[in-house]
Image: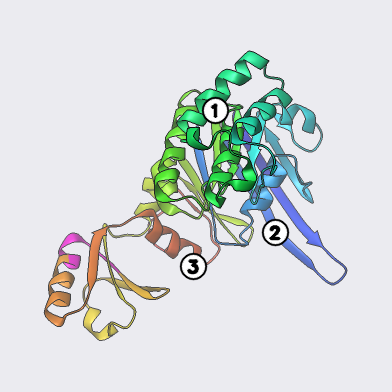
Amino acid sequence: MKAVEARQLVKVYRSRRKSTTALRGIDLDVSAGKLFSFLGRNGAGKTTFVKIASTLLMPTGGEISVLGHDVVNDPNSARKEIAVVPQGIRPYWHLTPKEHVFHYLRFRGVTREEAKSRTEWIIRDMGLEEFANTPALQLSGGLKQRTMVAMVLASTAPVLFLDEPTIGMDPMARRQVWRVIENIRSKGSTIFLTTHYLDEAERLSEELAVINNGEVLYKGDVAGMKAKVGADYRAILNRSTPHSLLEGYGKVMEDGGRLLVLSDRKGVMSLAEMASREGIEVSVGPVSLEEAFILLAGSDSRTWEEGEEDGF
C-alpha cells in the first residue's frame, strides 16, 4: 500500500479578480515507510499539496488518499493516520516545550503514562532539556520551531507531514532533528518532507520529487536526480569571472552571484589550476543535489522519471 497516492490532483485558488492554479493534475505515489522529500521553489505548489494531503485544504479536482483512506470523502480516517508540522506553525506562548508535547499526545489519545514517557524521550533527543520548562514566550525562534517539530514527531504517527521543519534552526539543531527523523522513520513511519535545504534532502531522502509551477518535473531518488546533471564534478567561481576564461572546461551556468562549471574530475582540476594562476577564487567538489535542482527547476516543464535519458 502507498502512504500517499494522488491522481490528477488540481487546486485552483479563486478570488474576485483572478484565478491561480497551484496544482496542475499531479500524479504522485509515496511508498510507505520511506522518507520522501518534495522539492520546489517558492510558490511551486509544495505547501498546497501538503495541506490537501493532510486534510487542511480541499482540492479542486482529482483524487488523493493516505494509507488507502480517501482524503476528501473520508478525512476522519485519514486524520487518524497522520501528524503535521505545517509551515509557519506557532506555539502557545504560555506553554513550555514539555507541556506542548505532553498535551498534544494526550489530545491524540495517548495514555498519560505513555505521553510522559514519549515527552521525556523527545525532549532529550531534540536537545530541549535545558529549555523544557521555559514558556514559549521566552524561547528563540529556532527553539520555538524545534518545540513544534518535537510535538509532532513524538506522535510517531504512521504518516508525518513536515513542511519546512528545520527553518530558522542553526546547523547543529538541524542535524539533531535529522537524527530524530531518521530514528522515527527506521521504526516504520512514513516521512513526507518539504525543504529548501538541499543538503537536508540529500542526507535524508530515500525518494524525492521536484515540483515547479504546479507540475511534477522529476520523481525518483537522489542518485537518479544527480545523474541528470551529466557531470560528476562542479567548480564554483565568482560571477564576475570572464566567461572567456572558462571555455573548454565544461558546461557553465549562472546561479545568483556565482558561476558553476560542470565537468569531469580532470576538467575541474584543470580549471582550478587556471584559476590559481589568474588569482581567481574557486572551490571544487562532487556534484550535489543543489546543482541538479538548479538545472531542473530552471528548465522547461517536461517530466523526468528514472530511466529516461540524461540531460537537461
The percent coordinates of residue 300 (x first, y second) are 52, 67
In this rendering, position of residue 272 left or right of residue 95: left
In this rendering, position of residue 214 left or right of residue 235: right
Badge 2 local density, few (<14 within 10 Å), some, or many (20+)?
many
Residue 16 image-quadrant placement: bottom right
| 263 is within the stretch colored magenta | yes
Badge 3 local density, few (<14 within 10 Å), some, or many (20+)?
few
Label tally: 3
Which residue shows up at 56% across the image and 18% down it?
117
Which residue shows up at 58% across the image and 28% down it?
154
- Marking on residue 298: 3
Q: Which residue is mark 2?
A: 22
Q: Which quarter of the rendered picture does the C terminus lie within? A: bottom left
Magenta-tinted stretch: 261-268
Q: Is residue 286 visible in this depiction of the protein?
A: yes
Which residue shows up at 65% across the image and 33% down it?
100
Q: Earlier in the sequence, mark 1 or mark 2?
A: 2
- Identified by mark 1, the residue type is Ser
- Alpha-carbon span between mark 3 and mark 1: 33 Å
The percent coordinates of residue 33 (x first, y second) are 52, 28
Q: Earlier in the sequence, mark 2 or mark 3?
A: 2
Q: Which residue is mark 1?
A: 189
